[in-house]
């Protein structure tokens, strides 16, 4: 018997572990097959809300924010590439960090249009896989079109400032709930799994939730 499950996925385009987490979660759901009918709802989180329009080099940004050396950053990125490959996500070269607020506005609109998860995955691929600028309206509109959304309407949303208040409200809601790092994956509004976990961790968590009925 197929059981419904709601999955709230709190994340940021800028977060490599969010790319790993979404890929891992989707693989877990694929393994479970007809046992589960999952509704994934994407929610915004900004790792760098004060980032300027031109972005910043990853080495400079991580060095300033976390005190990491270039060698430490390179080591972490190699580990992230390995973890990504294990769940089918191929990381490409990323040299800069960008502001992602407009991407979150577009994702809110995509949720209304029924294409939110598809756009989320495509944006993660565009940035982490292809090194594209996720603050660029051209990149955002083209990525929206690639998953079947209307590029003209996407551009109108981006240029209008639509859904800014909705995104801010969601960010405050999850911060108030204690979410301070991403990805944060919440099952049935009750059970939290944090981080880009292996497929087996997500699969086991979902099986346990399904067993509760």
Image (cartoon, grey):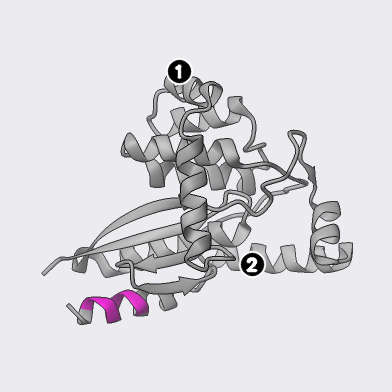
Q: Is residue 46 left or right of residue 35?
A: right
Q: Is residue 108 left or right of residue 72?
A: left
Q: Is residue 98 left or right of residue 114?
A: right
User: Residue, x 55% and y 59% (percent of image)?
Assistant: 18
Q: Is residue 125 above or below residue 75?
A: above
Q: Which mark is residue 82?
A: 2
Q: Which mark is residue 14?
A: none
User: Residue, x 67% and y 36% (percent of image)?
Assistant: 133
Q: Residues within 10 Å of mark 1 (few under 14, many from 20)?
A: few
Identify the image quadrant of the C terminus. Answer: bottom left
Q: Is residue 45 above or below residue 197?
A: above
Expressed as whole percent of the image width and height from the top left, the position of residue 31 reads 31, 68
Residue span colored magenta: 205-210
Let me know if residue 127 is in the magenta part: no
User: Residue, x 42% and y 51% (percent of image)?
Assistant: 42
Q: Is residue 126 above or below residue 211?
A: above
For the residue pair 70 and 48, the one nearer the viewer reads as 48
For the residue pair 166 and 44, the one nearer the viewer reads as 166
For the residue pair 124 and 12, the one nearer the viewer reads as 12
CA gap between label 1 and label 2 equals 37 Å
Q: How many marks?
A: 2
Q: Residues within 10 Å of mark 2 (few under 14, many from 20)?
A: some
Expressed as whole percent of the image width and height from the top left, the position of residue 201 reads 43, 78
* Residue annotated with mark 1: 152
């Amino acid at each position: 018997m197929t059981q419904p499950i709601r999955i709230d996925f709190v994340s940021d385009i800028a977060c490599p572990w969010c790319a790993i987490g979404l890929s891992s979660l989707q693989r877990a759901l694929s393994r479970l097959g007809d046992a589960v009918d999952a509704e994934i709802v994407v929610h915004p989180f900004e790792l760098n809300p004060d980032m300027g329009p031109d972005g910043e080099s990853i080495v400079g940004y991580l060095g300033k924010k976390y005190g990491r050396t270039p060698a430490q950053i390179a080591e972490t990125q190699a580990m992230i590439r390995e973890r990504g490959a294990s769940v089918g996500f191929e990381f490409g070269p990323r040299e800069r960090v960008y502001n992602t607020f407009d991407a979150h506005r577009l994702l809110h609109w995509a949720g209304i249009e029924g294409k939110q998860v598809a756009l989320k995955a495509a944006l993660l691929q565009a940035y982490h896989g292809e090194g594209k600028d996720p603050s660029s309206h051209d990149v955002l509109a083209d990525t929206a079109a690639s998953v079947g959304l209307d590029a003209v309407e996407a551009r109108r949303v981006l240029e209008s400032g639509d859904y800014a208040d909705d995104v801010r409200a969601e960010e405050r809601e999850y911060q108030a709930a204690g979410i301070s790092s991403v990805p944060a994956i919440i099952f049935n509004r009750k059970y939290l799994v944090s981080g880009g976990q292996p497929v087996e961790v997500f699969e086991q968590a979902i099986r346990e939730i399904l067993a509760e009925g």
